[in-house]
Image (cartoon, helix red, strand yellow):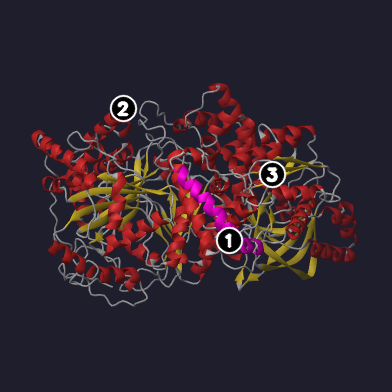
Amino acid sequence: LSPPTSIPRPGVVPGTYMSLSLSLSHSPRRFLPLLLPAPPFAMPPRRDHGKQTQQRWKPKAAPAPSSAAVERMALAPSTAGAAQVWVPRGYATSASSSSSSAVTAAEQGGAGDKLSRLIKGAAEFSVDNNTFTEAQIRATFYPKFENEKSDQEKRTRMIEIVSQGLATIEVTQKHSGSLFMYAGHRGGAYAKNSFGNIFTAVGVFVLGRLFREAWGGKAPKMQAEFNDFLEKNRICISMELVTAVLGDHGQRPKDDYAVVTAVTELGHGKPQFYSTPEVISFCRKWRLPTNHVWLFSTRKSATSFFAAYDALCEEGTATPVCKALDEIADISVPGSKDHVMVQGEILEGLVARIVSRESSVQMEEVLRNFPIPSLDGGDSDLGPSLRDICAANRSDEKQQIKSLLENVGSSMCPDHRDWFGYSGLEAQSRNADKSVVTHFLQAHPTDYATKKLQEMIGLMKRKNFSASFKSYWNYQKVDSLSNDNLCYKMVIHVYSDSVFRRYQQEMRKNQELWPLYRGFFVDVNLFKANNKKAAELSKDSNTLLRNINGALDSSLSSKDGLADEDSNLMVKLKFLTYKIRTFLIRNGLSTLFKDGPSAYRTYYLRQMKIWGTSASKQKELTKMLDEWAVYIRRKYQNKQLPSSTYLSEAEPFLEQYAKRSPANQALIGAAGDLVQTENFLAILDAQRDEEGDLQPERGTAPSSPTSTSLDVVSKTEGLIVFFPGIPGCAKSALCEQILNTPGGLGDNRPLHSLMGDRTKGRYWQKVADERKKKPFRITLADKNAPNEEVWRQIEDMCGMTKAAAVPVIPDSEGTDSNPFSLEALAVFMFRVLQRVNHPGNLDKASPNAGYILLMFYNLYDGKSRREFESELYERFGSLVKMPLLKPERAPLPGDVKTILDEGMSLFRLHQSRHGRAEPSKGSYAQEWAQWEKRLRVVLSRNANYLTSIQVPFDVAVKEVLEQLKAVAKGDVKTPDTAKRRFGNIVFAAVTVPQADILSLLRKLGENDGDVNNFLNGIKVEDNLSKAHVTLAHKRAHGVAAVASYGVYQNQEVPVSFNAFLYTDKMAALEAQLGTVNGEKIDSKNDWPHVTLWTAPGVAPKEANMLPQLFSSGQAKRVLIDPPITITGVLDFY
């Protein structure tokens, strides 16, 4: 639906919109303002070895070209007979008109003095009734939606809604680089959480060079027009920036490049993101590089896609992955940059998300209307490369930035203020930080967008979300600054993924909230207005724009009838060949050099367990990584290999390792293409990692427990029972009860308890020493084990003393950011304050008892209950829950909740200022003393409530004992909600019941003496362990062939057996496959069969030769008449 002509979209002439007759069920139609005609001629050979990408799609029935879905993409320029198509307004395109002229040194000096006075005087700025604020989003990437579903649940749901015709699955390559956002030279260049640094300078240079490659001699003019276009239309483009100068990811790229991943229309309201067809049309007009995109719009193609990933997840590299997806997808649109040519074979992964059901039609229209643009600068001199410039400027980061910006040229970047400040003033003065956010939240909003941003930031501040709101002086607006008109750039930096999840929960409560974006930058203007103007602003600010934006928000709130959670479904699917390099080698360096090979082995085995890596790959990787650990430690001794350049050592090692065998080559994926970066690596702050992926991946916690087999504790092994809890959770009392229970945990292993409060020295080292003496006994580790560091030590003990470990946790609902609820915390505090003469001096006589429990509670901050339990399951394979609170209970009294909230707020203040210092020694000592007194009064006043909501201790002990005995015996399976272990699929087959096959063979033997003698001779009853008809094998038929059976997975298939063939070396049953839902199931094998037996040394695949052997008289064939039909199940193996 077109916006009303009285309120034109940016860059559009009022009254020139197309007249469309659209169904209200369709999403709002957007038309891109296009300046450049698509060239009618083919693209000349590219510099990447002359290989030119070809667009491909499979023609199929589609709505007529006049359909609404097609009209949305009718982007051709206006012609004489095309009265229905709107024309964008003309723009000034000369470099001089869009570039700011140079400011003389004298003028800059005067302005600099003025700015210095303003900055100093800004501290005196105060908010009164005449203070207003206007905020505009300057750059942003997609919101981060933390769906509560597991990856398997997401996959299943995505297939369901595609099957129902409600949506399409869109898949794109995940290039291994950094997020770069660009809003024009005035709008700014941004990295994920920063601006004005080497990351953004590199981004601007690479973008400018892409224009030179595309436009040749016209590049300066087009750069200026592009900047002008982005500024006037308030558009931001997001790109994946892939370079060899900003530190190592999974593979050093052969060339420095970028691909556009999003185009965002910022306007003056909520950001609107272009659909992928619109992104491609936008990029082809400006000759910008696009990503490889695949669309899956049917149940068959969608299930085949996920099956293909499962087949490739442990060995996939760019070439076989793209080949398989090209064969499976309904539409394949190759990227402008061939991943193999510019990045290499190591592919980080794929991103699959739900998009509009109209995407396929729209994409086909775009591919027809917008051919691949030419590259006019492909054979011309583009000037010094990124690597040349960085190599020539090795003095410091500023020198590299300066040279990059100068080389990209004034048409692309005429103003360097964001990097170097203004007239001697620092580019990113932090003087503004302290008060800007407070003033912004207090001032009157001038429009609806500002009000929504105030609402978002205010909520995050009130909820103490882990995020910062750093503000910097906006030097782009220096000419308009005054004492009563202050302009800032605000960087909204979210520190933890849990914040996105918590914010989403708030959005469910308040659907009017705007999303929380990744890469989030806002221009903030604080100003004073005179009384008359203030009255006008107050009256008008929430009328027109509210109505407009509210209407737009509501019209965009649903996508094609999908629920909000469905429209945001997305899964990231990474490949093991990439994860070997980044997560197992790079992120394991600190553990390897700090804690040694044993700790490193524990680290990488845990990672593989979290990922669900197949047993065979785990075995191969263990051998390779152990060898890597010895090699790199011997070479570097005690000096750790830098993470940013780890590939300088890892790649040659992997190359040599891969050469030893084909199996090693498959494990590594690709090696030997090392790009040497030592001479041109950008100079980076050692602590700064723009993408945030240099920290060890401690395992993104799955959504649910994942072990799928019995967690059996062998009687020849020991057992460590430990307690990830909080003081007051009754672990010591529980340990005492376990020790006093006749028969212990139901076996003859001795029980031993070590109480933390009575143990001097390093507790966990003492536990390890005791276990070495008697490794087969059961150890009760009577001490709180609240964090991953302790859990790693327990894992090490398990490995060293051949033991299993089981965590015992208090059962609690938890909060959105802590595995323990406030009710649980209140009970723990109440219990502690009832104690007397506690061996650890944590009782009613302790002046800081409340503070200590808050400290423990805070150790779990950032983990939801689901994440907490899942990680423990992942690490230890089982989990015991100790009942704590009665299900039917009254809500927490208000005064108890208030005192706990006050304590947590005080704890955060104390921690931010004094760290781990005792409360009595900090500046909040008086506040702590008062709070501790009030805590005791409040809990005492609510003693009856706190007692009544607890599960009786004897009941809790009984349940814990039963669970521990079950774990020790191996009687426990993880819950049915366990996520599926994505495995290395090798083949698809129909499995038939072994008993039914044996029954068939007995009948056959009864009617034929020779067959009976043969079957008795090979002891078929003893040797037949499984029976299946192979449909397709990855090695023989390809990934796409195997994946094509995904649509029939877990379906019953009738299999008719009509002959028995055998020789002295093999035997098989000839099979004919039936149908599933009316569709015939065919095997890719020429002769479908079930292999029953092969002699020692004969491979099962040799049974394929039985028909030929029969034809030549070397095998016998016994007819089964009438054929016998057995029902099997189709699955992957």
Q: Position of residue 847 (x, y in %)?
A: 57, 44
562 left or right of 598? left
Q: Is residue 560 above or below residue 857?
A: below
Give the extent of the magenta segment: 924-948
Q: Is residue 133 above or below residue 653?
A: below
Judge the density around disc 1: few (<14), some (14-19), many (≥20) Cα neighbours within 10 Å.
few
878 left or right of 50? right
In front of the other: 1075 or 420: 420
User: Which element type, helix, strand or loop, lies under badge 2?
Assistant: loop
Q: Position of residue 781 (x, y in %)?
A: 71, 42
In front of the other: 749 or 944: 944
Q: Which residue is mark 1?
A: 941
The total number of labels drawn is: 3
Q: Amino acid at mark 3?
A: Asn
Q: Amino acid at mark 2?
A: Asp
Q: Position of residue 1010 (x, y in %)?
A: 89, 58
Q: Disc 3 vs disc 2: which is toward the camera?
A: 3
User: Which element type, helix, strand or loop, lies under badge 1?
Assistant: helix
Q: Quadrant of residue 18?
A: bottom left
Residue depicted at x 43% and y 53%? 464
User: Which element type, helix, strand or loop, lies under badge 3?
Assistant: loop
State the separation of the CA atoms marked 3 and 1: 23 Å
Judge the density around disc 2: few (<14), some (14-19), many (≥20) Cα neighbours within 10 Å.
few
The circle drawn on residue 837 is: 3
Quadrant, the N terminus = bottom left
Q: Which residue is mark 2?
A: 396
Q: Amino acid at mark 1?
A: Arg
The circle drawn on residue 776 is: none
- For the residues bearing labels 3 and 2, Cβ distance under 8 angstroms: no
Q: Disc 2 vs disc 1: which is toward the camera?
A: 1
